[in-house]
């Protein structure tokens, strides 16, 4: 019998290693392409309230997209960690580094009903479900919502398993954007 948690962990580590091998110049080029694709899709879907992440080093740098969306008067929300999950709070300065090295604004005490969520991934499995860093925060966040926004996964280079590594509660995307 295969230990699924072990297989998922091994896959996660191989994806992280693959992401760490991307050169700085290649990363910048890929990010520009991905951010452009994201912007086009947001326009096509006519999303007004958007949950987006503040990137960690191995994630697509979406900060140029955040700035552009704000200039376009879109409502931009980011994760604010609360217990074992997070809530969507309005993006605003200042941004501070918090638990797990994640950057976030101050708590706005406002929970938004988002139209669209842009979610970073480490990889995906055979069912196109998200493999993240292993904390389960996004899975808990989406599980607790009483509605389902459009979900877009982003990754610099697609890292996909041929096996099913996820559980029923792991989130699945409507779109996956890589370069």
Image: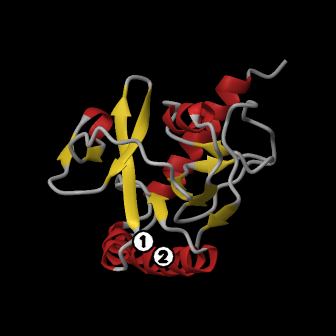
> Which label belongs to residue 30?
2
Q: Nearer the viewer, residue 6 or 90?
A: 90
Q: Residue at x 62, y 79 (%)?
A: 44
**Which of the image's four quarters has the N terminus?**
top right
Q: Quadrant of residue 41?
A: bottom right
User: Residue 128 location in percent, x, y?
Assistant: 74, 51
Circles 2 and 1 in contact, beta carbons < 8 Å: yes
Q: Residue at x 35, y 78 (%)?
A: 68
Residue furthest to the top in view is 1
Q: Residue at x 23, y 47 (%)?
A: 105
Q: Nearer the viewer, residue 27 or 102?
A: 102
What element does badge 2 sit on? helix
What element does badge 1 sit on? helix
User: Residue 161 location in percent, x, y?
Assistant: 74, 48
Relative to 56, 153 lies left or right: right
Would you place residue 172 above or below residue 34 in this image?
above
Residue at mark 2 to residue at mark 1: CA–CA distance: 5 Å
Q: Which residue is mark 1?
A: 27
């Amino acid at each position: 019998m295969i230990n699924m948690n072990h297989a998922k962990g091994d896959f996660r580590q191989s994806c992280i290693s693959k992401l760490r091998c991307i050169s700085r110049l290649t990363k910048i080029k890929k990010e520009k392409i991905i951010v452009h694709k994201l912007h086009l899709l947001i326009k096509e879907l006519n999303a007004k309230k958007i949950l987006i992440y503040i990137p960690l080093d191995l994630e697509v740098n979406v900060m140029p997209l955040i700035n552009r969306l704000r200039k376009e008067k879109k409502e931009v929300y980011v994760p604010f960690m609360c217990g074992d999950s997070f809530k969507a709070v309005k993006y605003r300065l200042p941004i501070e580094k918090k638990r797990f090295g994640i950057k976030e604004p101050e708590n706005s005490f406002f929970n938004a009903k988002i139209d669209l969520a842009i979610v970073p991934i480490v990889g995906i499995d055979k069912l196109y479900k998200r493999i993240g860093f292993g904390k389960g925060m996004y899975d808990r966040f989406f599980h607790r919502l009483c509605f389902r926004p459009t979900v877009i996964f982003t990754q610099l280079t697609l890292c996909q398993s041929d096996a099913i590594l996820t559980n029923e509660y792991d989130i699945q995307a409507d779109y996956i954007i890589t370069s």
